[in-house]
Amino acid sequence: MTNTSTFIKELWLPTLAMIVIVVVSNIVVQIPINDWLTWGALTYPVSFLVTDLTNRRYGPAKARMVVYVGFALAVILSIEFAGARIAVASGTAFLLAQLFDVYVYNRLRGHAWWQSPLISSVLASALDTALFFSIAFYATPVPWVTLGLGDYGVKLVLALSMLVPFRALMHYVSPAEIKS
C-alpha cells in the first residue's frame, strides 16, 4: 500500500480531528473567559488525546504524519480565521509540542497504560503553552503571562481527564507493533 493510500485509509480521521481542534482553538483562544483563561484552554488539549491514540494505534511514524499534515492545513486555515500572528504562534507551538508528545509517548510505551498519555501530554502542554503565548501575545496589551499560567493549569486538569476517553478507547485502538 502506498503512503498516500495508507494515509487516506488509516489517518484521515485523526488528521481531520487535529485540523478542526487546532483551528477552533486558534479562534477561541482570542476570547478570554477571565483574566486567567481563554476558551482555547478547553479545546486544544484534546489534540494530545488524538496524537496519543494515533501513536498507540499506528506508531510514531504515522503519528508524526498526522502532526505534519494537521500542522500545514491548520496553519493555512488559521491565517484566514484567526490571523497571521495567532497562526504563526499556533503552528510553531503545535508542531514542536506535538512532535515532542509523540517522542515522549513512544519512549514510555510499555509502561502502565496511563503513564504514556499523561506524561507526554503534561510535558508537551508546557512546551506548547510557553511557545504559543509568548509568540502570540508578546508586546501586546494581552496579559499573556497570566493567561498562559491559567491555560497550563487547565491543560493539566484536562490531561488527567483525557485519561478517561483514552482508557475507554484502548479496547478499540489496539497498539501498534513497534519494531526496535
Image: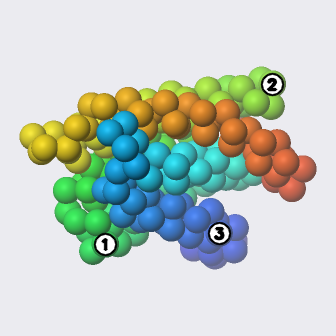
Look at mark 1 in the image and give the residue it sits on. 81
Look at mark 2 in the image and give the residue it sits on. 112
Q: Amino acid at mark 2?
A: Ala
| Alpha carbon distance from label 2 to label 1 | 40 Å
| Alpha carbon distance from label 1 to label 3 | 22 Å
Q: Amino acid at mark 1?
A: Phe
Q: Are marks 2 and 1 in contact (CB under 8 Å)?
A: no
Which residue sits furthest front?
Answer: 34
Q: Amino acid at mark 3?
A: Leu
Q: Dividing the picture into quarters, in which one does residue 23 lie?
A: bottom left
Give how far across and how far down residue 65 sits, in percent: 53, 57
Residue drawn at point x = 56 percent, y = 70 percent: 16
In the picture, the quarter occupied by the N terminus is bottom right
Q: Which badge, 2 or 1, is on the more N-terminal residue?
A: 1
- The crowd level at tag 3 (other Cα within 10 Å; few <14, some 14-19, many 20+) is some
**Secondary structure type for disc 2:** loop
Is residue 117 left or right of 153 when viewed as pictured? right
Look at mark 3 in the image and give the residue it sits on. 13
Q: Can the viewer see residue 106?
A: no
Residue drawn at point x = 80 percent, y = 31 percent: 113
